[in-house]
Amino acid sequence: MNRPPGPRGSRLTGNLAAYEQDRLGFVLEQTNTYGPVWSFDSRTVVAAGADEAGEVLTRPEFVVGTDHLHREMSVSKAQRSHTRSARMLGLRPSAVTGWTSRITATIESSLSGWPDEIDVVAELRRLTSGLGAALCFGEDAATMVEREQELFAALTPIAGSAFRMPRWVPWSAPARTDRANRELESRIQTLIDRRRTGQAAASDDILTLLMTPTGRHGELDDEPLRSALVSTWLAAQSSPTAGMAWVLLDLARHPEARELAAQGLEGTRAVVQESMRVHPPTWLLERTVAEDTELAGYHLPAGTMVKCSPYLVHRDERYFTDPERFRLDRWAPDGEGTRAPRFAYLPFGVGARVCMGMAWSMALMTNLTHLIVRRFHLRELPGATWFPDPGRELIPRGLRLGVVSGTAG
């Protein structure tokens, strides 16, 4: 069979050890060596080119598997359709626009409590967790936040792994995850029961949309309802946290970013877009081959896992000159980013399974960026150490920034 080429690795661990030593460096090196499609191992292929990644993300034979909780595939196709439709309804751009005042007020309240030095990821995670809880549970959000953070912490070692361990292997991380997930779902179930019996009023939230019967699917069962809420809540805070963390670093590093963001919405969007090009929070997207197929002339048997990497696609010099540089002119009306082909810029994926939280993430990031430059100067701290951590999302692990009052100008 004509499989994609790739590094052989060691006999015992394959390419895993080299990958874990420097994930980003490893995938960049192999892409430069083997081209836009290459094999990580006998079961996994990487689609690193824009056209190839676009095919994987839009062709029907490449399907989405389970999430990190291994829950989505346990419900029926009709139930999955119901939950996705309801969540997309709650996260559509027009619905997110209705949240603008609440997003702004929450961010303003958070910023008013910022000290002179912040742990960037931790500070942003508190902010996005609260907003995500309000999105999912409305007036009942406050009772959920603590358990969600426990589950997110429990997921970190799983989501950060190159491969998922089988559920039957008795190691501690899945047990911890199951425990945290059960506790969170128990609280969600209590709220569902209260809503069903009229003890708690319906609210402007995702839970209400999920509980609303449809003519096509009827009323959703409790299990897929709980699963959809946990997945939505985690997603509503994970990618925005990572994306905003990189934006804050870029505001601290690049005075021109602060100046452009202070000019209004278009400038703010350009800052966010370029930050997400250089450091896409979702740096790997995963699909599974449902039936034997071909990609770029290579045979892929059913069951093959295909990893698409926006991080690699965004570094294609055919579309982005000097791709490692942070350059805001890419997003001018005639800039190369604005003119780039459809699949050359993929911070939220593309196609039917594009990230349903795209509008939510952009609303959080653009609002936060605009409000920060109105209030603060951010600065890197001398001697501080941090590193880009490509785990569940690509985040600046350990990043701390100084916060100085004063507007951009």
Image: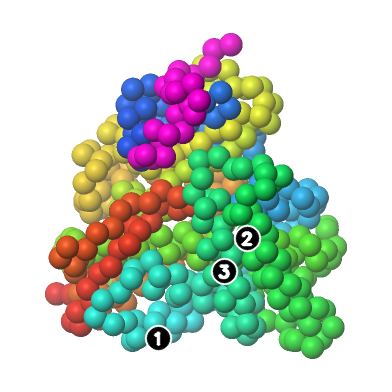
Q: Secondary structure at mark 3?
A: helix
Q: Quickly name the residue at label 3.
A: 150
Asked if the stretch drawn in magenta spans residue 18, the answer is: yes
Check disc 2: other Cα within 10 Å, few if <14, some if 14-19, many if 20+: some
Main secondary structure found in the magenta portion? loop
* Residue 234 can be seen in this image: no
Residue at 36% in and 34% down: 26
Where's residue 257, x and y in %? 21, 62
Quarter of the image for the C terminus: give it.
bottom left
User: Which of the marked residues, 2 or 1, is nearer the chain's N terminus?
Assistant: 1
- 92 vs 186, left or right, is left
Query: Which one is in front in this view, the residue at disc 3 or the one at disc 2?
Result: 2
Could you tell me which secondary element the residue under label 1 belongs to? helix
- Looking at marks 3 and 2 on the same chain, the residue that comes earlier in the sequence is marked by 3
Badge 2 element:
helix
Q: Is residue 106 left or right of residue 86?
A: left
Instruction: State the CA–CA distance, disc 3 to disc 2.
Output: 9 Å
Range covered by the magenta-colored residues: 1-23
Q: Quadrant of the N terminus?
A: top right
* Up/down of 162 relative to 236, above or below: above
The amino acid pointed to by label 1 is: Ser
Q: Nearest the camera: 392 or 317?
A: 392
Q: Residue at x 49, y 61 (%)?
A: 238
Q: Which residue is mark 2?
A: 176
Q: Mark 2: which amino acid?
A: Arg
Q: How many marks?
A: 3
Residue 9 in view here: yes
Name which of mark 3 and mark 1 comes first in the sequence: 1
Seen as rendered, the residue at the extreme top is 1
- The residue that label 1 is drawn on is 109
Is 78 contained in the magenta span?
no
Q: Residue at x 79, y 88 (%)?
A: 199
